[in-house]
Image (cartoon, rainbow, N blue to C red):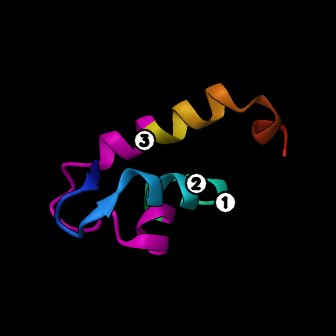
Amino acid sequence: MYACICHGVHDQEVRECIRAGAHTEDAIGDACEAGTGCGNCRERLADMIENYFASEPAAAAA
C-alpha cells in the first residue's frame, strides 16, 4: 500500500525509514520524500511513527 501517492512511497519504505531513525514527518520526507508533495499523507506518517513506538517499547528507549 502507498503511504505517499505523490512520490510513490510504499508504507514498508516509510517503516524502514522510521526504524532507521526518521522519527518525525520531516525526517521521513528527508529520507524518502514521503510527505513532501501535497501533504495529505503527513497525518498517516505521524500515525505510522506513533504506531511504531507503541508497538516497539525497546525502540522508544533507544
Query: Under tag 3, what secondary structure?
Result: helix
Instruction: Please tell me in which quadrant of the rendered image residue 20 appears.
Output: bottom right
Query: Mark 1: few, some, or many residues within 10 Å (few <14, many ≥20)?
Result: few
Q: Which residue is mark 1?
A: 21
Query: Mark 2: few, some, or many residues within 10 Å (few <14, many ≥20)?
Result: many
Q: Is residue 44 left or right of residue 6?
A: right
Residue positioned 34% across, 63% down in the render:
34
* Kind of residue indicated by mark 2: Ile
Residues drawn in magenta:
27-47
Q: Which residue is mark 3?
A: 46
Can you tell which of label 2 and label 3 is closer to the viewer?
2
Separation of residues labelled 2 and 3 (CA atoms): 11 Å
Residue 5 screen position, x and y as percent:
18, 59
**Is residue 53 in view from this perspective?**
yes
Residue 16 screen position, x and y as percent:
56, 58
Residue positioned 39% across, 51% down in the render:
11
Q: Is residue 27 left or right of residue 4?
A: right
* Kind of residue indicated by mark 3: Ala
Separation of residues labelled 1 and 3 (CA atoms): 14 Å
Instruction: For the residues labelled 1 and 2, say whether their Cβ atoms are less than 8 Å apart.
Output: yes
**Is residue 35 in view from this perspective?**
no
Q: Which mark is residue 18?
A: 2
In terms of depth relative to the viewer, which is nearer, 24 or 49? 49
In the image, is residue 32 part of the stretch drawn in magenta?
yes
